[in-house]
Image: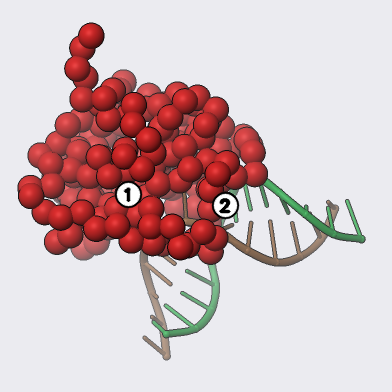
Chain colours: A red, B brown, C green
Amino acid sequence: MTRDPLEALLSGSVWEVAEGLLGWTLESTVGDAITAVTITETEAYAGELDPASHAFRGRTPRNAAMFGSPGTLYVYRSYGIHWCMNVVVGEPGLAHAVLLRGGEPQQGVTVMEERRGRATDLTNGPGKLCQALAVTGDHDGLDLRAGPIRLVRGPGIGGRTVQRTARIGISKATERLWRYVVVG
DNA sequence: TACAAGATTGTCT
DNA sequence: GACAATCTTGTAG
């Protein structure tokens, strides 16, 4: 069988994927512009096993995409204002997902600056990342292999270390070190 | 039917 | 460092 690196990555556990996604490229082809970032910050959410996950209390119209197949994009609205995106992992119905929290601008920086309305802090946060790449609820449930939002093998983390820390912005299960960050 | 809380960000002091 | 903006979900009456 083919050795598609994305398939190989997605076949792992949600924690393996969260760490393995660091250094990958997230490419967006929304509109006429192509924008891409190198992923440097992720968090693991283990569905119904995880009190901090949206899927903990079962399936709802909002989180339905999380119960789909591995490689599905799950986009949700945060605080009614921002969008945040996840990569679905594991068997369908498991609702495991990796939250993409941040990255380094790699392509289409000018477009990202226009979308963000500023030239600093373009992609160092979940909501900012989605705005810079023009990811919205319209992309919820899409396949990350097909686009317009795609995951492709990136330059890697260049020998830098990966740090594991507590997750951010949640009030439950904060003792679990399920956040992965590239140092530097 | 009403209300509180949330995987955030930007602005003001 | 503190607070407002704004929408979806879950729970209570």
Q: Could you say which quadrant of the image residue A60 lies in?
A: top right
Q: Which mark is residue A51?
A: 2
Helix, strand or loop for disc 2 = loop
Residue A9 pos. (x, y %): 27, 30
Residue type of the residue flagged with mark 2: Pro
Front residue of this view, candidates A121 and A184: A184
Q: Quadrant of the N terminus of chain A?
A: top left
- Residue A180 visible in the picture: yes
- Compared with C3, A178 (above or below) is above
Disc 2 to disc 1, C-alpha distance: 18 Å
Residue situated furthest top in the rendering? A1
Helix, strand or loop for disc 1 = strand
Q: Which residue is drawn at the image coordinates 24% and 61% (left, top)?
A: A121
Residue type of the residue flagged with mark 1: Thr
Q: Which residue is drawn at the image coordinates 52% and 31% (left, top)?
A: A94
Look at the numbered discs 2 and 1 and tell me whether their residues touch, using CB distance below 8 Å.
Answer: no
Check the residue under mark 2 and report the chain it is in: A
Residue A116 pos. (x, y %): 29, 54
Front residue of this view, candidates A169 and A5: A5
Q: Which residue is drawn at the image coordinates 24% and 58% (left, top)?
A: A163
Residue C12 pos. (x, y %): 85, 59
Q: Which mark is residue A42?
A: 1
